[in-house]
Amino acid sequence: MLFTKSTAYALQALIELSKYDKPIDVTALSEKTEIPKPFLAKLLQNLSKKNMIKSYKGIHGGFLLTKEPKDIKIIDIFKIIEDKDSLVFYCSSDARNCTRDRSAICSTMPFFNKLENEIDKIIEKYTLADVIRMKSDK
């Protein structure tokens, strides 16, 4: 699974949101996570559209998790933020996605597909609670 900066920032924001039982606004969240506010606002909007978080308007508005961290899968966060299936490598099991249009002659594609599937199986097991726990185990 190729995690971009967007996914890393989304994880950071969700970890921070997990500390609150009332909405926190994007400015405060940006300050606490040191994620640029415009970038963070866009990520939060995507997460809100997919019901990962709830958006509240008004003077006491902000964002709040819609589920407990133990119920939020890391793979789901990735799919929301990256807006695609998980891919570690530029190739995939679907020959139509080959960026070089060489899937018919590619000798490494079967290996990368197998490796991709194994990585996905591992990542599917992890939740936001696991990531939070790992941080505190440091």
Image (cartoon, grey):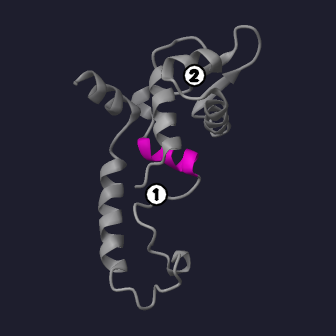
Residue for point 57% across, 46% down: 80
Residue for point 44% across, 61% down: 87
5 lies left or right of 30:
left
Q: Nearer the viewer, mark 1 or mark 2?
A: 2
Give the label on residue 6, or none: none
Magenta span covers which residues? 74-82
In the picture of the structure, the residue carrying the numbered disc 2 is: 30
Whether 82 is drawn above or below 40: the answer is below
In the picture of the structure, the residue carrying the numbered disc 1 is: 86
48 lies left or right of 19:
right
Whole-angstrom CA distance, mark 1 to mark 2, is 27 Å
Q: Residue furthest right?
A: 58
The N terminus - image quarter? bottom left
Res 116 visible:
yes
- Asked if residue 49 lies in the magenta stretch, the reply is no
- Asked if residue 77 lies in the magenta stretch, the reply is yes
Residue for point 59% across, 29% down: 36
